[in-house]
Image (cartoon, coloured by chain):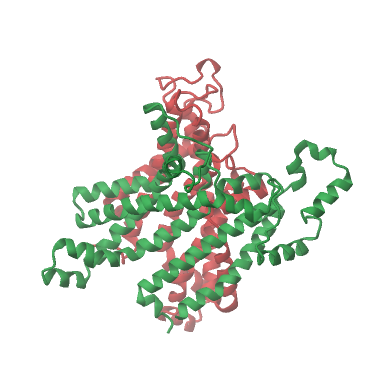
Amino acid sequence: MNYVIRRLKAFPLVLIGVSVVVFVAIRLVPGDSITAMLGTEAGLLTPQQRDSLAIYFGIDQPWPIQYWRWFTGLFSGDLGISVTYGKPVLTVILERFPLTLELALLSMLIALSIGVPAGVFAATRNERPADLGVRIAAMIGQSTPSFVVGLILIYILSAGFGVLPTMGIFTPFWQDPLENLSQMILPAVTLGCAFAASVTRVSRSAMLDVLSDDYVRTARSKGASERSVIWRHALPNALVPVVTLSGIEFGYLLGGAVIVEQIYALPGLGRMVLEAILQRDYALVQGAVLFIALNFMIVNLLVDLAYAALDPRIRLEGR
Amino acid sequence: MRVVKAIFSHPSGRIGGAIVLLYLVVALLGAVGLTPHDPLMQYRIDRLQAPSSSYLMGTDLFGRDVMSRLMKGVGQSFTVAFFSVAFATLAGTVLGLTAAWYGKRWDTVMMRLMDVLLAFPAILLALLIVTIVGPGTWTSVAAISIVYTPIFTRVVRGPALSLKEREFVDAARTFGSSRSYILTRHLLLNLVAPLTVQVTLALAWALLTEAGLSFLGLGTQPPASSLGLMLSDARNLMEQAPWLLAFPAVAIMLSILGFNLLGDALRDILDPKTRRA
């Protein structure tokens, strides 16, 4: 379990590093948050009012003290107060997170349910026209940016069917599942396209590797049916790299798909960060970026652990 | 030369290579200004014209020639992609080589630092950098190179660590070869193959990231043109003027596809492990 312990030990160190980078980076952004918050009205503030606002948001102190306050606050879930929303940062983040989480889960579902069968299908028809077709489709899918997919989908819907996708509103799943899915399906497909393409490519090549292994030949020679060889013997082992890829991709998506959320005007985490950066909402950007990085790191750690659990060669490394 | 020959006898290498070459020509023409029309000139009477013989790809809302803007945009996107990947490769190679060579504390510090950078989703890190420095061509270059430096550092460090322990490096040391000679001749030369593959694939990502940043309004600034910006402008007009959507969309896709195909071919050719009989 050497490997696992090493990974766990590095975790807090990297997290502190991330928090410092975020903290310093957001303070290097030119302009101050009070002016950004109030716009032209900021000019009407008396120096006293400005000072008391700065004290309220804790931005009157020198950087190291601000950092220390922020960092110690993290442990009690206190990420400060968002200047633009006038609410605790954690509350704002947690309001936006369900949408982002759902979007990530849906696109992963789409990617896996298309990608894995397509990859297996192509691998079992190696170098034949069907394989070539799948590979070309996957290559094109992987090379198409999400915003191109999104715009083309919107165009097809509006020009071909005269319907415009609902935008800008979000109904939580537990309030109205059907309404929610009708809002989320297009963004999820948009994100799922490139994702499905990479899953296809990885499962195809992993499947090809596994199919040439000795144990698969053994299974065939003992008379197992082709179907059982592929789905029961080969696929479980071929899924190891697919798990890794999906995990990493999922971790990225948890950070909010800025561009796709922007196209469909979805109030998700990614768009919130973009707006917070533009508004110089220090506390919100800090908290959100840390939250996203933490998610990303936890997912990556889980992927590594899953990988180690699935592949004994890694688990035993360094023993 | 052997590699070039191998690329063109590899099916996806041939297609990828041809696409990349085509784009290089277009990018060069666009960059030096050899376009059918002036990409900034507004032919007010010819606003939103469909593709015709005088405007091969039609005109936009301001009556600017889409094809000229597209060529200029490809030049712009490629400039950003090439410079950012070049900087990332250089920084990553130096960091990765020295981390592997000096090991110990330097290695630990460097790799933890790279872990910190890798903990940020790429587009988010790029967004942060762009916001600090303000949008623009060179900011995009800086942002994309910082995002990809950790990846190159890892690509170099891993193989460099194992190369360092090989007999020929010991032999070079006993001959009295200098440190810089060993680092460049023995380590770096052996890393050219994995680096080439990584560079090609990174160019595809860099094009994607540049287009994404410009699409969000944080990359190339108007009135200059870039593929991402053209798509973003097309958003509200695509029903009346679908050519505004179609040409830039296909142009972005093909450019990324070209580098992806080429990178795949190079991996097959240069990496003996994935070479299949």
Judged left or right of residue A266, residue B159 is: left
Question: Residue A240: percent from the left, percent from the top?
Answer: 34, 66
The number of numbered discs placed on residues in the rendered structure image is 0
Question: Residue B113: percent from the left, percent from the top?
Answer: 59, 67
Chain coloured red in this rendering: B
Residue at left offset 49%, top offset 81%: B173
Q: Nearer the viewer, residue A213 or B155?
A: A213
Location of the C terminus of chain A by quadrant is bottom left
Question: Residue B8: percent from the left, percent from the top?
Answer: 29, 50
Judged left or right of residue B16, residue A288 is: right
Judged left or right of residue A303, residue A235 is: left
Q: Nearer the viewer, residue A128 or A261?
A: A261
Look at chain A in the picture and name its colour: green
Q: Is residue B160 above or below residue A135?
A: below
Residue projecting furthest to the front: A175
Residue at left offset 57%, top offset 49%: B141
Q: Nearer the viewer, residue B66 or A39?
A: A39
* Picture quadrant of residue B107: bottom right
Location of the N terminus of chain A by quadrant is bottom left
Could you tell me if residue B59 is visible in this image?
yes
* Picture quadrant of residue A250: bottom left
Residue at left offset 53%, top offset 28%: B39
Could you tell me if residue B262 is visible in this image?
no
Question: Residue B130: percent from the left, percent from the top?
Answer: 62, 48
